[in-house]
Each structure stands twice: as C-alpha cells, then as structure tokens.
Amino acid sequence: MFRIKICGVTTVEDALAVAEAGADAVGLNFYPPSPRWVTPQQAQAIAEAVRGRLLRVGVMVDPAEEEAASLASRVGLDLVQLHGNESPALAARLSQRIPLVKAFRIGPAGLRPVLDYLDEFRQLGGRFQAVLFDAFQPGQFGGVGKTADWDAIRGYPSESWHPPLVLAGGLNPDNVVAAIHALSPAGVDTASGVEASPGRKDPALVARFVAAARQAFDAVL
C-alpha cells in the first residue's frame, strides 16, 4: 500500500515530478467528466514512465467488472480505486482479481453507510487494500477541493478486519500535517491541493505536500 498518493496526474512530466518528490503512488483518473481524465493510452505512457518508482492507481467510477479488469491489465495498474456507487457484490468479485481501494464520500449520514457496505462486502468474501474517505458534494465524485468530515471519520473502527484508512478531501501542503495528527490515517491523497491548474500539478506544491506528510507520519507512527 501507499502512504502518500498524488492523484489526477495527466502527464508523464507531472508523474516524474511526483516520483522525484518522494511520493508513493500516482493516481490516474479514468472518469471522463473529470478535468483530470486520461485516456488509456495516456495512462499507459504515464504508468510505464514511473514503473518501479510509484504504485500506479487507476481511479474508476462505476466500471463494469470486465472493463475494470481489462483496463488495469492494459495500462499496467498496481491498484484500482473504485470511486463511484459500485455495489458490494461487484466490488467483492473484482477484489478477487485486482487489488482494490474503495472510496467513500462521507456525507450527512456519516460512517453508517460505509460500515454497512463494508460488512456486506466482507460477508461476500471481498478484501480491500484500503478505504479512502473523501468529501461529499452532491453530483460530484471527488476532486472538489473540499475538506472531508474529520469529526465523522474519527469514528472509523479499528478492528483488524477493517481496511486501513486513507484520507482525502481538500488536503494541501498547509493542512496535511494537522490532518495526519488529528486522524492518524494509514495514508493521504491529494489532487487539487497541489495543482497549478485542474489536471496539471505544481512541482513545488507536490514537493511541499510530500515533505510535510512524511514529517507528520514520522511523528505519529
């Protein structure tokens, strides 16, 4: 798994900057409405450029099972991050074929829908490498630059069968230290918080984010 992921990378140049900064993973977004969307061909070039240096994570929204498996193989992904409304049954089947991370947007109902989902998923024999908690915004599937509900997330259980928690949602170089100290996540994830413009990363912001997160993880672990 990863501790620091930079998501929504759209160019080889930006991916190499992420690797140089010392991050652990790069996220490639396959959701066409997103300003950070990449084609399979673009993703394949990025994935090849950072092979052996970064985990390559494919972000998918409501993919069909065969579509997700085929895309992961074609691009050379190490993990698939399900970021839509995928059913526990589909996720359980897919988790037998590909290492998975499942993203949840923490809304007004708090953690209850997440815990119910994970319980059903577990009963179906599924296994996630991690769960990612993002901010909730109606009609959006992430990347909105809004901070997640930290108070709700503090209630995430710590039983051994619960997947490790990755925190996303509005993280940037100025608040990632506070986030790690407040919630002790297994990892952090940012997209818009280190961008010069939607889909293009600012190498200086990426470097600041990675350095701050590493320092905070070293202090709490």
Image (cartoon, rainbow, N blue to C red):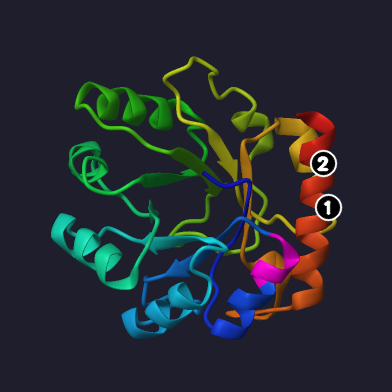
**Residue that numbered label 1 is attached to:** 212
Residue 124 position, x and y percent, is 19, 27
**Residue that numbered label 2 is attached to:** 216
Residue 118 position, x and y percent, is 35, 28
Eyeballing the image, is 71 above or below 126?
Answer: below
* Amino acid type, callout 2: Ala
Q: Nearer the viewer, residue 38 or 116?
A: 38
| Label 1: few (<14), some (14–19) or many (≥20) C-alpha neighbours in 10 Å | some
For numbered disc 2, what is the local secondary structure? Answer: helix
Can you name the residue that lies furthest to the front here? 52
Q: Main secondary structure of the magenta part?
A: helix
Q: Identify the image quadrant of residue 77.
A: bottom left
For numbered disc 1, what is the local secondary structure? Answer: helix
Quadrant (top left, top right, bottom left, bottom right) of the C terminus = top right
Q: Nearer the viewer, residue 54 or 32?
A: 54
Circles 1 and 2 in contact, beta carbons < 8 Å: yes
Eyeballing the image, is 181 above or below 155?
Answer: below
**Which residues are the magenta region?**
18-22
* Amino acid type, callout 1: Ala
